[in-house]
Image: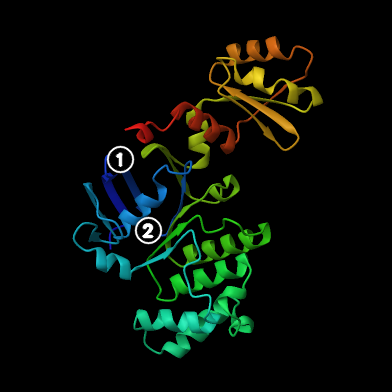
């Protein structure tokens, strides 16, 4: 196998007249965890499905796990685990029955032992007789992860896997993802959570079907060349709309009890802040990943594909 688990260039996917993905390049080294970020409809899910052979590409080329993505989709799928946004297993079956059914689909040898080992590994043994439809979001997530990794894939594709689960379940899930990665599994995960993105080796940001930026968190923040100021004064809530209207302000948004204001020209940004909030004390801070992505989203503007 190549040192790159995924090596694709110029991926394009159209649905009718709309371009869902427009020339995306990804080179994902084996054994790393990469995050896919971007607003809803940015092309993350479509790109994931092209990589693993679930969608035919309209243009571009590349390989996944050493196989050509256009000609060997079935081989890629057998070596890939794909966890969809929506829970996609059988609510009327128990946890064990779900896993046994998946093992049959993959024609796994020593099926009973494989299911037992998977139940134990994912902490599902005590709940194995419980119906999947009765599980909470966190336990459904754990069942889904068990099912998509039971055949020991080389690549794991996760499409917003922690949406709707509590913080502890998210933390446990990511601990398991990094455990799998240390064992050699390559992971590509789409997420809207900035704290999850920061757990990835590298992140890729898509907007309106285009690849906007990629790199480590530190690289992306540095490359943005963004200046950020924050204030805790109660009065800032009344100034946010005026701040957003200033040309020098790339974005203004609440982060907890503080308001963050960011821009690309420091002097102009300070002048705008002073003009709108002369009686409020501001502190310069390092921009966060969320500051950068809000600014990138604003810079990307409206999705013109909707009007094509």
Vertical relation: 94 (above or below) 85: below
Query: Could you tell me which secondary element the residue under label 1 belongs to?
Result: strand
Q: Mark 2 points at which residue?
A: 30
Q: Name the residue under label 1.
A: 19
Percent x, y of residue 141 = 56, 66
Q: Which residue is drawn at 67% across and 15% down?
A: 273
Q: Which of marks 2 and 1 is nearer the N terminus?
A: 1
Q: Which residue is drawn at 49% across and 31% down?
A: 296
Q: In which quarter of the image is residue 253?
A: top right
Q: Residue at x 64, y 12 (%)?
A: 272
Percent x, y of residue 121 = 55, 77
Vertical relation: 148 (above or below) 237: below
Horizontal side of 174 relative to 241 (left or right) equals left
Q: In which quarter of the image is the C terminus?
A: top left
Q: Quadrant of the N terminus?
A: bottom left
Specify whether residue 4 is in view: no
How far apart in space, not on screen, are marks 2 and 1 (Cα)? 29 Å
Query: Could you tell me which secondary element the residue under label 2 belongs to?
Result: loop
* Structural crowding at the residue carrying mark 2, measured as other residues with C-alpha within 10 Å and reported as few (<14), some (14–19) or many (≥20): many
Percent x, y of residue 52 = 32, 60
Horizontal side of 236 relative to 30 (left or right) equals right
Q: Quadrant of residue 4?
A: bottom left
Between 217 and 194, which is closer to the camera in this rendering?
194
- Residue farthest to the left, as pictured: 71
Specify whether residue 100 is in view: yes
Percent x, y of residue 304 = 37, 31
């Amino acid at each position: 196998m190549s040192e790159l688990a995924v090596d694709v260039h110029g991926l394009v996917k159209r649905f009718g007249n709309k371009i869902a993905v427009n020339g995306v390049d990804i080179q994902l080294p084996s054994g790393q965890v990469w995050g896919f970020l971007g607003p809803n409809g940015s092309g993350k899910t479509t790109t994931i499905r092209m990589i693993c052979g679930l969608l035919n590409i309209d243009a571009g080329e590349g390989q996944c796990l050493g196989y050509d993505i256009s000609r060997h989709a079935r081989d890629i799928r057998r070596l890939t685990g794909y966890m969809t946004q929506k829970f996609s297993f059988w609510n009327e079956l128990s946890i064990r029955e779900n896993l046994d059914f998946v093992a049959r689909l993959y024609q796994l040898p020593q099926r009973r032992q494989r299911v037992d080992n998977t139940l134990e590994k994912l902490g599902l043994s005590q709940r194995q007789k419980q119906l999947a439809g009765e599980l909470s979001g966190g336990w459904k997530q754990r069942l889904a992860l068990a099912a998509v990794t039971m055949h020991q894939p080389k690549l794991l594709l996760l499409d917003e896997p922690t949406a709707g689960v509590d913080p502890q379940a998210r933390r446990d899930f990511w601990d398991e993802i990094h455990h799998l990665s240390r064992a050699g599994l390559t992971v590509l995960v789409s997420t809207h959570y900035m704290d999850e993105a920061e757990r990835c080796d590298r992140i890729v940001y898509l907007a309106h079907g285009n690849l906007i930026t990629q790199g480590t968190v530190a690289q992306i923040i540095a490359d943005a060349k963004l200046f950020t100021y924050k204030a805790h004064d109660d009065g800032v809530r009344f100034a946010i709309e005026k701040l957003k209207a200033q040309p020098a302000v790339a974005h203004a948004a609440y982060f907890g009890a503080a308001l963050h204001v960011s821009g690309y020209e420091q002097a102009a940004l300070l002048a705008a802040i002073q003009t709108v909030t002369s009686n409020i004390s501001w502190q310069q801070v390092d921009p966060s990943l969320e500051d950068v992505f809000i600014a990138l989203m604003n810079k990307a503007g409206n999705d013109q594909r909707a009007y094509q």
